[in-house]
């Protein structure tokens, strides 16, 4: 994806009543490279590719309507 400079891991703790709605819109987000349903505090973990901090804020605002989000910017790939 051209112009994408910032890979980010986003954990999402979905509100139970919004799980199905999130699944329906997931494919509408071209930023999402990978998405997994996982055990633990967050039930969704996504790797997204974003342009910059403004794009990160925009994306978080979109997905936060479905639950609490936590993001980590990837600064270096080790393996």
Image: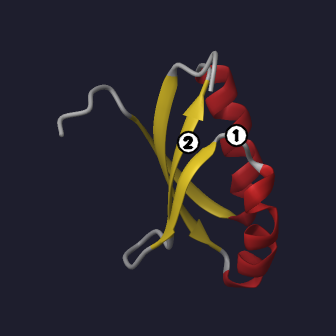
Q: Marks 2 and 1: CB-CB under 8 Å?
A: yes
Q: Is residue 70 above or below residue 22?
A: above
How packed is label 1: few (under 14 Cα within 10 Å), some, or many (20 or more)? some
Please name the residue shown 76% across and 83% down the image. Answer: 17
Q: What element carries label 1?
A: helix
Which residue, as the protein is rendered here, is positioned at the far bottom? 16
Residue in front for this viewpoint, 71 or 6? 6
For marks 2 and 1, give the CA distance: 9 Å
Residue in front for this viewpoint, 24 or 58? 24
Q: Which badge, 2 or 1, is on the more N-terminal residue?
A: 2
In the shown orientation, is residue 27 left or right of residue 15? Answer: right
Please name the residue shown 46% across and 68% down the image. Answer: 42
Q: Where is residue 57 in the image (x, y as percent from the top left)?
A: 66, 32
Q: Name the residue under label 1.
A: 59
Which residue, as the protein is rendered here, is positioned at the far front? 1
Q: Position of residue 67 (x, y in %)?
A: 66, 65
In the shown orientation, is residue 24 left or right of residue 56? Answer: right
Residue in front for this viewpoint, 42 or 4? 4
Within the image, what quadrant is residue 56 found in? top right
Please name the residue shown 71% across and 53% down the image. Answer: 63
Q: In this view, does 75 lie above or below 48?
A: above
Coloring applied to the structure: secondary structure
User: Quadrant location of the N terminus?
Assistant: top right
Q: Closer to the camera: disc 2 or disc 1?
A: 2
Q: Residue 31 carries which label?
A: none
Q: Where is residue 25 in the image (x, y as percent from the top left)?
A: 81, 62
Q: In this view, does 54 lie above or below 14?
A: above
Q: Is residue 10 above or below residue 59?
A: below
Q: Is mark 2 on a helix, strand or loop?
A: strand
Q: Name the residue under label 2.
A: 48
Please name the residue shown 54% across and 60% down the image. Answer: 35
Which residue, as the protein is rendered here, is positioned at the far top? 3
């Amino acid at each position: 994806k051209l112009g994408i400079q910032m890979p980010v891991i986003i954990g999402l703790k979905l509100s139970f009543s919004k799980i199905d709605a999130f699944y329906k819109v997931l494919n509408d987000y071209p930023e999402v490279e990978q998405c997994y349903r996982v055990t633990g505090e967050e039930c969704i973990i996504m790797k997204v590719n974003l342009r910059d901090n403004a794009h990160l804020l925009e994306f978080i605002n979109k997905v936060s309507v479905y639950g609490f989000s936590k993001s980590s910017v990837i600064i270096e790939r080790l393996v």
